[in-house]
Amino acid sequence: MASKKLIILCGPSGSGKTTIASHLMRSFPQLAFSVSATTRSQRNTEKHEKDYHFLTLEDFKEKINQDAFVEYEEVYPGIYYGTLKSELEKIWQENKIPILDIDVVGATNIKKNYSPDSLTVFVHPLSLENLKQRLHQRATESVESFTNRIHKAEEELNAAESFDRIVYNDNLEHAVAKANEFVNQYLQDIK
Ligand code: 5GP
């Protein structure tokens, strides 16, 4: 097999990155979604082991002690998220390429310490107003969680320039086409 490729999609909560990831997986069957672990509570639209490995804080901390994570992060106060080594290894063993949906700090850590040849793509909502509207429409968040997410988004937008590629999501169809183009280029790039 060629080098272990890896694609990281980043962007504020509500930027549309999860939707874009789904489109990418339909266009490129060699991609497989890397299921992160988290201590946040499960939304009723989500499936355990498919969207996330939903863990108790105790179990998450045990995995930290076992050095089971490539990276992990307290993304919101008291709420942990992390990429499991076992998840990436499983995908590579299937001769597939992991696609990760993680936050800016996690993406930066992976690119720097673990997989310098990874492709990092930032999904940019163009404005905070767009983001607020989308999060409202999605209606999955409590007031506290909504405020946390907007606060974090403000920080994340400043990091966009440090990514390999930026996809502006003012229009989903255009954003998906751009993301396809970037991923296609990366996959053809034989290392
Ligand atoms: P959500 O709760 O909306 O599913 O995700 C909240 C944030 O956590 C998003 O920015 C998402 O990309 C990020 N996230 C999800 N999984 C991971 C992970 O494994 N590591 C890190 N660092 N962030 C993650």
Image (spheres, grey):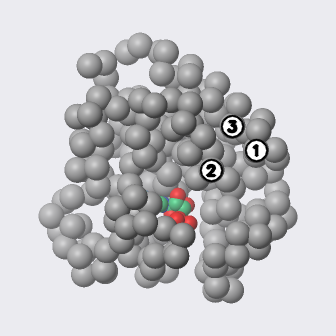
Q: Name the quarter where the N terminus is drawn.
A: top left
129 is higher (above) or lower (below) than 44: above
C-alpha span from label 1 to label 2: 9 Å
Q: Quadrant of residue 26?
A: top right
- Left or right: 130 as drawn, with respect to 19: right
Residue at horizontal 45 percent and vertical 31 percent from the top:
29
C-alpha span from label 3 to label 2: 9 Å
Residue at horizontal 51 percent and vertical 23 percent from the top:
186
Q: Name the quarter where the C terminus is drawn.
A: top left
Where in the figure is residue 47, as x and y percent of width and height?
A: 43, 66
- Left or right: 184 as drawn, with respect to 48: right
Any mark on residue 176, and which?
3
Q: Helix or strand or loop: what does disc 3 sit on?
A: helix
C-alpha span from label 1 to label 3: 6 Å
Q: Residues within 10 Å of mark 2 (few under 14, many from 20)?
A: few
Any mark on residue 172, and which?
1
Q: Is residue 91 visible?
A: yes
Q: Which residue is mark 2?
A: 19
Residues marked 1 and 2 touching at CB (< 8 Å): yes
Residues marked 1 and 3 touching at CB (< 8 Å): yes
Q: Helix or strand or loop: what does disc 1 sit on?
A: helix
Amino acid type, callout 3: Val
1 is higher (above) or lower (below) than 38: above
- Left or right: 63 as drawn, with respect to 151: left
Q: Helix or strand or loop: what does disc 2 sit on?
A: helix
Residue at horizontal 54 percent and vertical 70 percent from the top:
45
- Nearest to N terminus: mark 3 or mark 2: 2
Amino acid type, callout 2: Thr
Q: Residues within 10 Å of mark 1 (few under 14, many from 20)?
A: few
